Image (tube, grey):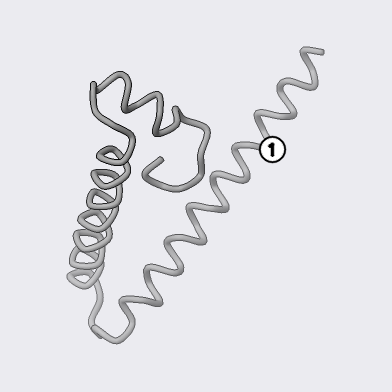
Amino acid sequence: MLTGFGGGPGYEEIAHKLEMNETAVRVAVHRLRERYRDMLQREVAQTIAETDSVEDELNYLRSAIRGKIAEKAVTIRRGFGSIM
């Protein structure tokens, strides 16, 4: 849910487990994503010489993560194919 890639429980299920309403869960997730984005930007900014390239570094990181997730999904699908 945090990454936006799905696959986990939905807002409704989480709200039920936490005894919260769905709107409150959505707001909490939104705020968590904002905090995560801000913290990640600060951390990346500390690792590079030019502050102008923070967004470029973040884009590269996102691409790398997406590639790894896509690569893992293909590997998992192949594994299931051999089972069936």
Residue identified by numbered label 1: 74
Label 1: state its secondary structure. helix
Quadrant in the picture for the C terminus: top right
| In this rendering, position of residue 17 left or right of residue 72 | left
Residue 83, by quadrant, is top right
| In this rendering, position of residue 63 left or right of residue 13 | right
- Position of residue 30 measured from the top left corner of the image (x, y, whole percent): 29, 51
- Position of residue 54 measured from the top left corner of the image (x, y, whole percent): 31, 76
Residue 44, by quadrant, is bottom left
The residue under label 1 is which amino acid type?
Val
Total number of numbered discs in the rendering: 1
Q: Residues within 10 Å of mark 1 (few under 14, many from 20)?
A: few
Instruction: Judge by depth and name the residue closer to the eye, 31 or 63.
Output: 31
Q: Residue at point 57% right, 53% down? A: 67
Q: Residue at point 40% right, 29% down? A: 12
Instruction: Judge by depth and name the residue closer to the eye, 25 or 73.
Output: 25
* As drawn, 46 above or below 67: below
* As drawn, 39 above or below 23: below
Q: Residue at point 52% right, 33% down? A: 7
Quadrant in the picture for the N terminus: top left
Q: Residue at point 25% right, 39% down? A: 24
